[in-house]
Image: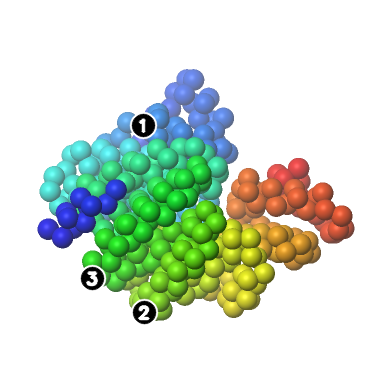
Amino acid sequence: MRRRQLLAGAVGLGAAMVTGQGRAAASSRASDPAGLLEAALFQPQAAEPMSLPRLQLALSAARRDFRAARYTVLGENLGRLIAAGEATREATTDAAREQAQSVVARSYVLASELAVKVHSDVAWASADRALNAARESGWPAPLGEAARVLAIAMRRSGRAGSAVDLLARTAGELGAENSVQAHAVRTSLLLTGAYSAAQAGDRGTALDLTGEAEETAARLGADPRAELYTVDATPAQVALYRIGIHNALGTPDEGVAYARSISPTVFPTAERQARYWTDTARMWARIGDHRRTYTALRAVDRAAPEEARRPSVQALTADLLYASTSLPGLREFAARTGAR
């Protein structure tokens, strides 16, 4: 009953047949995650239902691709995963249907996360579908994860204040769920809310939400049950968010201590390590230290090459090209990562 009350209050895979013109279109999208996402959402593939254990294995594989920053591979596989998940959902009932709904929700969460990475507008559509499936699943964790990606899409469209409201409301509702994973999801919502508040220029709310998240993360410690689908709720994650929050607030110098307090190796995934180096590069860029910015950008490329080719990271590299400082190998680096 509690799960239903919470949901009421909160906003190989099957074979894919590609022939003729469709095969040519698929080929043209082979290295374009944005195009692959659009196809997955708006040109759905035919798929047969599969057993829930096989579906979970396919979802786990997609999650590994995201965490390893293999975005092209993820884009290629998401369409089949989503189609199989939806087919399985329609063929099941009761508890099995709830489980299938949770897989569908998390598939769309991954799609929305990928859309944000490649600056695709389909982040809105995938996040909305994630939230609808999460509501139907009756599971608090997918609900929180879906609310988080929807808030990110809202923030990126200029509605940071509305994103904070959604995240704070959902975090409050999850706070009544007395489970380790619910508290972990709540922590991730608070962190995303803090960053959204910083984007809106609301320093007080940003720091308050970060402090609350920090307290919860400290209590959770290293409990393996606190592991989340994309962003974990750990003290190191809080420190990482503080770097980005101070960048957004226009006080990058206040982020230096947090950047130095953690080693990127503490993060278990290539995606999070690259995020550390990206936020650190932004920090040094805003401080005006070109050498350290370049060092951080090269570390992004070492940790996760596809991250270095994201539009926002390419923009940091391009800015260095027009700076007066001479940095050995910069032009070659920019060419290799697509920034020039």
Q: Label 2: which residue?
A: 219
- Say which residue appears at 44% left-offset and 59% top-offset: 193
What is the quadrant of the N terminus in the image?
Answer: bottom left
Q: Quadrant of residue 300?
A: bottom right
Left or right of 149 on screen, residue 170: left
Q: Quadrant of residue 184?
A: bottom left
Q: Position of residue 247 (x, y in %)?
A: 61, 61
Mark pair 2, 1: CA separation: 44 Å
Q: Which residue is the site of mark 3?
A: 178
Badge 2 marks a residue whose secondary structure is helix
Residue depicted at x 82% and y 53%:
323
Q: Position of 242 compared to 191: left or right?
A: right
Residue 113 showing in the rendered view: no
* Residue 332 drawn at (x, y percent): 80, 50
The amino acid marked with disc number 1 is: Gln
Between 12 and 7, the one nearer to me in the picture? 7
Report the residue at 52% width, 39% height from top: 120
Disc 2 residue type (three-letter): Arg
Q: Secondary structure at mark 1?
A: loop
Asked which secondary structure carries label 3, the reply is loop
Instruction: Looking at the image, tell me whether mark 2 or mark 1 is earlier in sequence order.
Output: 1
Q: Which residue is mark 1?
A: 45
Three-letter amino acid code at the position of disc 3: Asn
Give the residue at x 82% y 56%: 329
Query: In this image, 278 relative to 226: left or right?
Result: right
Which of the two discs, 3 and 2, labels the residue nearer the N terminus?
3
* Numbered mark located on residue 262 in the image: none
Cα–Cα gap, marks 1 and 3: 39 Å
Q: Nearer the viewer, residue 22 or 261?
A: 261
Q: Nearer the viewer, mark 2 or mark 1?
A: 2
Q: CA distance from mark 3 to mark 2?
A: 13 Å
